[in-house]
Image: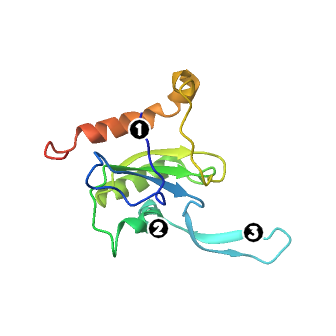
Amino acid sequence: MIVLLPRHWSYPDRETATAHVVLGEIDIFPHTDCRTALPGPRGEEKGVPLCPEQSAAVLRERCLGFLFGFPHLPIHLDGVIWQSNGELPVDTDYLAGVDRDMNRAGLRPLGWRVTGRLPTPHKQLPEPDQLKDPSFVQRYQPIAGRLRTALDTRPASRN
C-alpha cells in the first residue's frame, strides 16, 4: 500500500521518506485562457484554447508551487499523480501532450484520476476489506503500476 499525504499535512520529510510523490488536485482544468461570460440568455463562456504545453505550465504553477521558493529546499520528486475533481474537458491525446511537457520539465506523470466530486478536507485510508475488493483495487492499478516503475528506476544511491 502506498499512502500519499495531502500537501497541507506537512512539507515532505527528506530524512525519512523513501519517495516523494505529489497528488496534484485540479479543481478547474486549464484548457482555455481568459474565460469571460458573454451577455445573453445563455451566459456562454468563451476563452482562447490553450495547447497542452500551456496547460501543463498552468498546472505546475497552480498545483506544485508549494514545492518551490522560500523557505523550502528543493526535493527530488519521483512523480506526480493528477486528480481532477470533475470530468476533464479534454481528450486523451491532449492529456498525453500535458504528460510529455511534464516529463520535459522533469516532473514524471504517473497517472490521471477523476473523482467526480469536490475534494474532501479529510482523506480517509481504505478499510482492510476494501483492499481485498477487486472493484476497489482495479481502479488504482494503472497508477500503482506506473508508481512502482518510477520507484524501481530511481538511482541506487537514494535511500
The residue closer to the viewer here, 96 or 132, is 132
Residue 151 to residue 69: above or below: above
Q: Left or right: 88 with respect to 59? A: right
Residue at numbered disc 3:
44
Tell me which amino acid carries mark 2: Val
Considering only order in the chain, which callout, 3 or 2, is on the residue closer to the N terminus? 3
Helix, strand or loop at mark 3: loop
For image coordinates 22% across by 40% down, the residue present is: 153
Q: Which residue is mark 2?
A: 58
Q: Earlier in the sequence, mark 1 or mark 3?
A: 1
Residue displayed at 36% across by 40% down: 147
26 vs 45, left or right, is left
Q: Label 2 vs label 1: CA separation?
A: 27 Å
Q: Residues within 10 Å of mark 3 (few under 14, many from 20)?
A: few
Q: Percent x, y for residue 13? A: 32, 55
**How far is disc 1 from disc 3 in space, using C-alphas?**
42 Å
The residue positioned farthest toward the left in the image shown: 157
Could you say whether the residue bearing mark 2 is in a helix, strand or loop?
helix
Please identify the residue farthest to the right as the structure is shown. 41
Q: Residues within 10 Å of mark 2 (few under 14, many from 20)?
A: some
Q: Residue furthest bottom?
A: 39
What residue sits right under mark 1 in the picture?
A: 2
User: Which tag is nearer the camera, tag 2 or tag 1?
Assistant: 1
- Quarter of the image where one finds residue 144: top left
| Residue type of the residue flagged with mark 3 | Glu
Mark nearest the camera among 1 and 3 is: 1
- The secondary structure type at the circle numbered 1 is loop
Could you tell me residue 18's position as x and y percent? 28, 45
Nearest the eye: 30 or 25: 25
The residue lying at 56 percent from left, 29 percent from top is 136
Q: Earlier in the sequence, mark 2 or mark 1?
A: 1
